[in-house]
Amino acid sequence: MKYCLIIALLALCSDNNFAQQPAHAQKEDFSDDWAALSKYKNENAALPAPAVGEKRVVFLGSSIFEFWKQKDPKYFSSHPYIDRGISGQISPQLLIRFRQDVIDLKPAAVIILAGSNDISNDKGHVTNEGIMDHIKSMSELARLHNIKVILCKYLPVYEYPWNKSIKPAEKIVDLNNMIATYAKENNFTVLDYWTPLVNQRKGQKKELTIDGVHPNLAGYKIMQEVTEKAIDQALEKRK
């Protein structure tokens, strides 16, 4: 009887200890966060307001901008520049993120690089006019909040390694022409990434890219030069 009581007590203690063990936390499901608002949410919350006289600039785009900070972090850390690129994003996702990742950060200017992922993921429904609608909406939001607008002529792409059925070169040329025309009509600054990187077949120069789409460090150094000129030009413009 004595041994039975001891065994019962041990079993009870074991059950209590098991019950007190924390259950494994389930991994948070972000499948409802189509625009990846969660990616920079914490960084944005920790970011202080711009200092007096600070000319903060937000870089809004996809992998071109996200990889830039990875390859040349000093460029961003040595300037009041905020990189808000998310690899793979299309223009409507950038538009959804615009308030959180641009307006709320109170920049002096925003650089908008959009369109290539829309084209590379096209299943027959993407048009340059549709891409421009999203670019126009972002530009109008920026202007409403006194943020200088810098619109990028997209980098040249002859072929996407992950989707060789798409022939993007001419479509990017046409999109860039539309961006330049819209910018001129609205007194926005044009940042031309296409011209200094392009080769004879309207793709990127081999020595400046890792895959025909994304620049290498040498390519980013060239982009840095034209970016600085565009930022200076934009910040000098009257409201």
Image (spheres, rainbow, N blue to C red):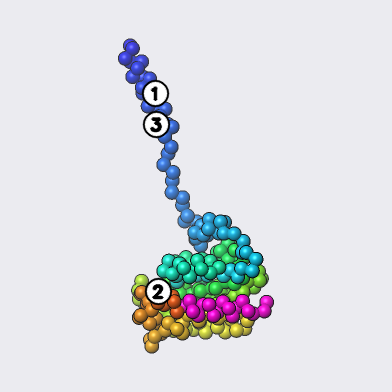
Q: Earlier in the sequence, mark 1 or mark 3?
A: 1
Query: Where, by quadrant of the figure, is residue 80 drawn?
Result: bottom right
Residue named by callout 1 = 12
Marks 2/3 in contact by CB < 8 Å: the verdict is no
Query: Where, by quadrant of the figure, is residue 234 drawn?
Result: bottom right
Marks 2/1 in contact by CB < 8 Å: the verdict is no
Residue named by callout 2 = 217
Q: Residue at x 40, y 74 (%)?
A: 217
Tell me which amino acid carries mark 3. Phe
User: Taking 68 as reference, is 7 above or below it?
Assistant: above
Bounds of the magenta span? Answer: 223-239
Q: Residue at x 62, y 64 (%)?
A: 51
Mark number, residue 18: 3
**Front residue of 114 and 221:** 221
Residue 37 at what x, y percent from top left?
52, 59
Q: Residues within 10 Å of mark 2 (few under 14, many from 20)?
A: some
Residue 199 at what x, y percent from top left?
39, 85
**Front residue of 69 and 124:** 69
Residue 232 at what x, y percent from top left?
58, 78
Q: Residues within 10 Å of mark 1 (few under 14, many from 20)?
A: few
Tell me which amino acid carries mark 1. Leu
Identify the element where label 2 is drawn.
helix
Residue 211 at what x, y percent from top left?
35, 74
Identity of the residue furthest to the right in this view: 239
Identity of the residue furthest to the left in this view: 3
> Would residue 51 be seen by someone viewing this image from the given angle?
yes
Marks 2/1: CA distance?
64 Å
Marks 1/3 in contact by CB < 8 Å: the verdict is no
The mark lying in front, picked from 2 and 3, is 2
